[in-house]
Image (tube, rainbow, N blue to C red):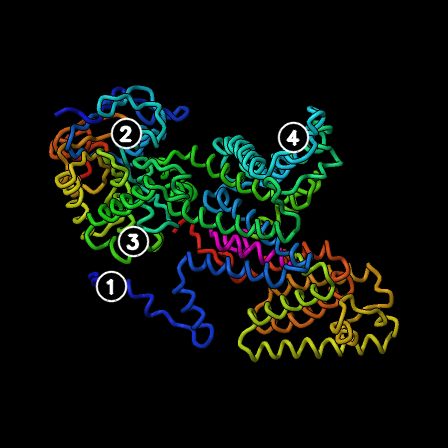
Amino acid sequence: MAPILELDGVSLSFGGLRALHQLDLHVDEHEIVSVIGPNGAGKSTVFNVITGIYRPAGDIRFEGRRIVGLRPHAITQLGIARTFQSLRLFLNMTVRENVAAATYGTTHATPIESMLRMPRARREELEVKARAEEVLGFFGQRLQGYRFDQPAYVLSYANRRRLEIARAMATGARLLLLDEPAAGMNPNETHEITELIGRLRDERGYTILVIEHDMHVVEGISDRVIALDHGEKLTEGTFHEVANHPDVVEAYLGRNPEALQK
Amino acid sequence: MTPIGVDEWVARSGDRRERHGGWRGLFEQADARLGWWSRLALLAVVAVLYGVFVARGNVNYAQVGFNVVLYAILALGLNIATGWTGLLDLGYIAFFGAGAYAYALFSSNAFGNLAASTGGIQLPAVASIPIAIVVVGILGVLVGLVALRLSGDYFAIVTLFVGQAFAEVVLNVAPSTLGGADGLFDLQGFHVGSAAIGSTLGYYWFEVIALIVLMALLHLLDTSRTGRAWRAVRDDPLAAAAMSIPVNRVKVMAVSFGAMVAALAGSVFAAQESGVYSTDFPAQVLILIYACLVLGGVGSIAGAVLGGVVVTVAEALLTSPIDSAYLFYGVLVIALIARVRPWQHLVAVIAGIVGFGFAAHAIVGAISHRAIAGSPGSAGWFASVLRHFVIIPAGSPPAYGNVLYVAAIVMLIAVVQLRGIRRLVAVVPTVYVAMCCWEARLSLEANITGQIMVGAILIVVMASRPAGLLGTRQVEVV
């Protein structure tokens, strides 16, 4: 399968701090790839360089097209959407509006057309509404019905995570970057999110790059796992290959694991 | 609606909410049934009734109505950048002024010295208003470009400079064209062919139509992709960018749209005044526009209009001694009713104020007759009632009023700090001192008092409804 996303020798420094160093990474179409690593390993930074928040050295290609230097909204319009580790919903907007706002890149009515509700604006509004409800319907009953018109700030933590995913879906992206989708969830919800990520790929055809700390989730969903530490790739492969790799064990537990087990 | 699993209980939370009884409950029910468009129609009806029954035949009332709608339009424009997009635009007054000057330039002899033979450019309103709006819209784009690099307080500081720069430019640059300190005058009113608006009431009608159309357009814009993008940028610019919204373009658009609304207001203002002067656009006007928006509820179309009504009517009332007394004592009584509960406490406080006042008046009068020989500043029946209540020395020396003013503020701060029964007790002398201060000094100085009263009304409203009269609660991080 052809890679949908390729990172080629990507490096990024904040002043003297080397956040990423010569990172190579690729995600194939319809693949679910997990990025793991200890805190500060550079996982979220990988997301930030892909989505254009930081401009790295090196090369990033999406569907063969170079995207380094494009602004974040342009990258999203090309087809990469993300969620945030620290939830970043539009808290004062309703659930439906949160999702509808993310369709900005796929709609084209000018303000004048919207103010006068000219045909294109009216058609797009209907489409946006249907799209928002359809996307929210993917999450079962949790974000439906009376929830549509509730402001996002009344949602529970788990529902906020779901809404972030719904919002990313509504952008029309083909590649989803999920930043710790199971963080702060209880075991039931964690199990549910594991299934959900599988369904995103199987039912909706998304390609997914996910950062996750919960090894059960990583084991449950990943076609391939990439381990990062100090901004460099330690190893990659199947979950079991990576989880048992000595460098990965060392990064998580420290040097000489035998000594710890005594 | 179909039942929705375990969350149904949450869905029905509205049904479990306590309802108010009596007229308040009826009002709330009626209010909940009205849709946005019927409310707009209601507003239009009120505006028409005011025009037909109140403003017609009375120039003062027509002028008040004109000012009310003018500030409502200005607040609506400010709401676009500040309320929806979250940009604290302190240069907004420059757009208002630029709109007025642009209209003036195209509707007077200002360009006459360029083309003396033609007697200047005197375009009809159908041409000069759109020109003014487009020109100021472009100015808005330029100011908006500043917003790309700056956010939050820094944007506010830079735009504050823009507002100042405008005042300096019209005062000092090209006085032969912009008029310098003399301003531009003898402007043509709105006219198309032989049809012309010649009275304040006429401009009031023009404004009302503009306001209703503007509210409708802005409502449709608010519920479109552009409006959603503005509010998304306000809530979280980074997330907005990640959700395919071009944050920079959206911000520039918001500032520019607001500028165009201000330019419309400026055109009407210039035409009605038949002149524009560099002193017409001071920081006080900007503060008043902000007061309208904040009072009504930032981010709410209806709120901006209501704020415009409340602030402008309050300002108008303050110019007449008897009306300003109604306003002052009205605010005082409403504040007491709203804040002092239960009603036994309220009765005690009011009785306390009355008793305290007459006692203080009697004691001071027994010591020195001159100390109570002055007359209250209020006119009409207020004056006769209050003569034996407030302490005003003969001739009402200004220094006395100044001392009382400081004392009232100090006591007010003390009241806010105290709790429980002590606060209740402290309210009594505080209100009395405030009343003495009002009668001795404030009611006589309408200009200064106007600013203070608007500030006081703002404080009272914001203390009880932090989101403004019609605003909805905004959360930052939950």
Q: Position of residue A232 (x, y in %)?
A: 26, 25
Quick one: quadrant of the N terminus of chain B? bottom left
Between the residue at mark 4 and the residue at mark 2, the CA separation in whole angstroms equals 50 Å
Q: Earlier in the sequence, mark 3 or mark 2?
A: 2
Q: Are marks 3 and 2 on the same chain?
A: yes
| Circle 3 crowding by C-alpha within 10 Å: few under 14, some 14–19, many from 20 | some
Picture quadrant where residue B107 is located: top right
Q: Which mark is residue B8?
A: 1
In magenta segment, residue B304: yes
Q: Is residue B226 left or right of residue B402?
A: left
Q: Which residue is mark 4?
A: B121
Q: The disc numbered 4 marks a residue on which chain?
A: B
Q: The disc numbered 1 marks a residue on which chain?
A: B
* Residue in view at x 63 percent, y 76 percent: B349
What type is the residue that disc 3 sits on? Answer: Phe
What type is the residue that disc 4 sits on? Answer: Ile
In the depicted structure, whether residue B171 falls above or below residue A214: above
Look at the numbered discs 1 and 4 and tell me whether their residues touch, using CB distance below 8 Å.
no
Q: Nearer the viewer, mark 1 or mark 2?
A: 2
Look at the numbered discs 3 and 1 and tell me whether their residues touch, using CB distance below 8 Å.
no
Q: Which residues are magenta?
A: B293-314
In magenta segment, residue B154: no
Disc 3, SS: helix
Q: Nearer the viewer, mark 3 or mark 1?
A: 3
Viewer-nearest residue: B386 or B68:
B68
Q: Which residue is mark 3?
A: A148
Q: Earlier in the sequence, mark 1 or mark 4?
A: 1
